[in-house]
Image: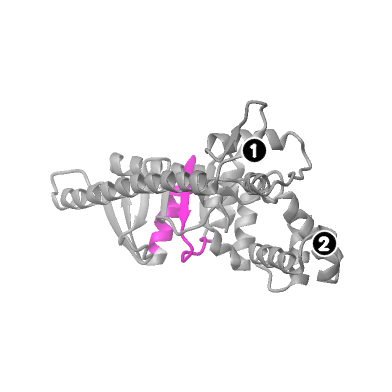
Amino acid sequence: MSLSSLGLTDFEECVYRDLLSGRETATDDPDDLPAALHRLADLGLVRFDEAGHPVPVEPEIGVSRLIRRRLLETHVQQRRMSAAWEAVHLLNAQQRDSCRTVTIEQIDGTDRIYERICSLALDAQEVLIMQPEHLRPCTDGLSARLQRIAEGARWRTIISRKSLLDPAVMDLCVTLHRAGDHHRLMDDDGQAMVIVDRSVVFVPSEPDGGHRSALMISQTGVVAAMTDLFERVWAHAQDLEPCHAPGLTPRERRVLYLLASTHKDEVAAREMGVSLRTYRRHVAALLERLGAANRFQGALLAKQQGWI
């Protein structure tokens, strides 16, 4: 079970697990370890004794405290979203009053929705996108989008990690990410939205995320609430391609090298100093992360993506 949903990076989790088991953490950069230890201390998972040595806090105490903190943050976000949906109902009432300025518009039909989004986004200076797993990234106007990014427009996109199991989605996201539309990954489905220049937000017209009908909202309070939600999710999401490789721990990186260079699991497990069952569990986790159907494809994808 991973602790990434509680805000830990893969390396920080590796350090914490190694402290619990009394092992020394292997790292390519010695500067990474002190930073990880101080981060774990901030999270309440590590304390330092009088001699300055790191001591792991028992999971029942430290991890439970982190879970409660994350649940509280989630509850606060849910309250913010509830307030935003209440604002939508008020805006609907305003729309029916012809004496007031229209700040909300319902758009029906997938093609019309994408057309309206593109017409605004391709002239914008900043575009923020959150797409849950069931919505594939839109390829409409891709060349114009890349051109706007090259001209200095700022695009950021949050997408569900599950979406990357589709090779076509993975290829598109990597292309956009490397072009400057920075992508981050969330573990769960989020609130689908597109925010243009922090002045207009597009959201599904139904809370369940249906994409055949959308609301275009320009009411300041709603847009601010949605922007705040996006920034909070962004702060806890993982970069699609972290600078230090894809967030691989030293152990995971070694598994990949063994996967690419060793044909027998027994030999690889012996090289790592772990049981055959443990090695195969590491391999299965990495293949799932790569979206690979088998080990040969996993080794190939890891090389293509620069993981090894």
- The amino acid pointed to by label 2 is Leu
- Look at the image and tell me whether residue 301 can be seen: yes
Q: Quadrant of the C terminus?
A: bottom right
Q: In the visual, does 133 lie left or right of 146?
A: left
Residue at the disc numbered 2: 258
Q: Can residue 307 be seen here?
A: no
Where residue 139 appears, as percent x and y from the top left, is: 54, 61
Q: Going by the picture, which residue comes out furthest to the top?
A: 50
Specify whether residue 133 is painted magenta.
yes
Q: Nearer the viewer, residue 209 or 14?
A: 14
Instruction: Kindly state the secondary structure of the residue where label 2 is placed.
Output: helix
Q: Amino acid at mark 1?
A: Ala
User: In the image, is residue 249 part of the stretch drawn in magenta?
Assistant: no
Which residue is label 1 attached to?
A: 36
Find residue 167 and report its image quarter: bottom right
Q: Position of residue 191 (x, y in %)?
A: 40, 55
Q: In the rendered structure, which disc, 2 or 1, sits on the residue that comes first in sequence?
A: 1
| Image position of 196 with respect to 161: above or below | above
Q: Give the residues drawn in magenta, as a range.
A: 112-138
- Residue 257: name its quadrant: bottom right
| Label disc, if present, on residue 303 of the rendered structure | none
Tag 2–tag 1 contact (CB < 8 Å): no
